[in-house]
Amino acid sequence: MLDLVGKGSAHTCDGTTRREFLQAGTLAAIGLSLPDLLAAKAAGSVARDHDERAAIMIFNLGAPSQLDCWDMKPDAPAEIRGPFKPIKTSAAGIEISEIFPRMARHADKFSLVRSCYHTAAAVHDTGHQMLQTGRLFTGGINSPHAGCALAYLRGRKTDLPPHVVLPEPMGRTGGNLPHGQDAGFLGKAYDPFALMADPSKPNFQVPDLLPPAQIGQARLERRRRLRDVVDETVAKFETSAGEKSLDSNFEAAFRLMTSAQARAAFDLSQEPQPMRERYGMTRFGQSCLLARRLIEAGVRFVTVNTFLTVFDEITWDIHGSKPFTSIEGMKDIVAPLYDQGYSALLEDLTERGMLDNTLVCNLQEFGRTPRVNPAGGRDHWPQCWTVHFAGGGVKGGRVVGRSDAIGGVPAERPIEPAEVVATVYKSLGLDLETKLPGPQGRPFPLVDFGKHEIKELF
């Protein structure tokens, strides 16, 4: 996080060192290190191309039930099919659950993939890793989130960060493992900017974007002058490639802090109240609206976490027994806010002419058990689940893959997490043969050899 008012402890003849200055409000506050920057520079991290397509990844933390949401089995026994009925959608031949009436009206814009699976442990954290990075973290190698890889390969377009996480990174979900929402082996220089605030709250502000109230323009100007003084004392180091890399990243961080463009992009008060209400005055709804604003302002990738943990709030994690909710509870608590926020996002992007150039993908870590448990819920099930994609070159109104009669395993076109992430990369115009500088500088493929995008979506 960015903070311009941190305090240093060491002193030089002018009272402040370069290191202090960075720790007191610049790159050190967001975890940048000189080795990270040098490695990135050596690997050509500022490579760009002309493809300006963006992405919004909605991650449905907790894992919606395929059988109660998007892959219903109305002819299965009651203990399999659950309590909800399928409804027709705007796409011929596609039905989804009655708990998503708004979403049903936009099925011509999105396509469902009903045959996802993985073979790792049935814990949230492993699924989070694989569906956001394409890999399970093994051997101490943490792969980068897709948005972080994009940030590494293309950099920023404006004063805004290339990748933003809303409303904040995933919290505890039981496995005590990394969730895959950072830059992994690429280094902290490419971690996303995390909002760390609830955009649905009154008087919402971004705590790490605007200077704190006690810092006025005069003190900000003084810090600029202080930096000039410090630069004069380190002129020799300034000539090195390392310092130049550090300096450019300092400038990017400071530019974000003082950018009118950045302040405007995060300022939801600029939206008419009817538009805010259209998305829903919930944390998820306002995060979706903010995602649209950020993409519109030049952010390349926004990750929206529907929920932040499975322990302190009701989520898609419908085990039934307390503190979790049941299948019926999902209908009453979770589905309405999701249905409104996601549908409004698709409508808004379409009306603004942005959907064709903005991928909106809805991912999750696994599915739910085919059989309803005694508590009226469903448990973890990585053997089969559904994800869906819209925009960004994806053709709407399609279904890819098929599950068996009880939604338990793929019956046609089984799809692994690496293929899901490859689809995100392909929509963004990235060459899947691209190599990243992995641990110890060895080349690391963007996706594993032999893994391709879900071609049927394009």
Image (tube, grey):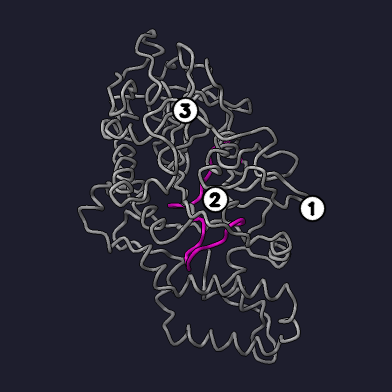
* Residue at point 41%, 56% (across, down): 295
List the residue tagged with mark 1.
Answer: 440
Q: Is residue 15 magenta?
A: no
Residue under label 3: 113
Residue closer to the observer: 171 or 351: 351
Which amino acid type corresponds to the residue marked 3 in the rendered image? Val
Locate residue 155, reporting x and y percent: 57, 61
Residue 338 lies, with reference to residue 357, above or below; the image says above
- The CA span between labels 3 and 1 is 36 Å
Residue lying farthest to the left in this orientation: 274
- Specify which label sits upstream in the sequence, 1 or 2: 2
Q: Nearer the viewer, mark 3 or mark 1?
A: 3
Quadrant of residue 371 within the rendered picture: top left
Q: Which residue extends farthest front?
A: 50
Residue 299 at x, y = what percent? 46, 58
Which amino acid type is shown beneath numbered disc 2? Gly
Residue 173 magenta-highlighted: yes
Q: Determine which residue is flagged by label 2.
A: 147
Q: Residues within 10 Å of mark 1 (few under 14, many from 20)?
A: few
Position of 131 relative to 167 (above/below): above
Crowding at mark 2 (Cα within 10 Å: few <14, some 14-19, many 20+): many
Q: Which callout, 3 or 1, points at the residue further toward the start of the chain?
A: 3
Tell me which segment is drawn in magenta.
152-176
> What distance separates the C-alpha of mark 2 from that of mark 3?
21 Å
Nearest the eye: 426 or 122? 426
Of the numbered discs 2 and 3, the one sitting upstream in the chain is 3
Contact check, label 1 and label 2, Cβ < 8 Å: no
Counting labels gives 3
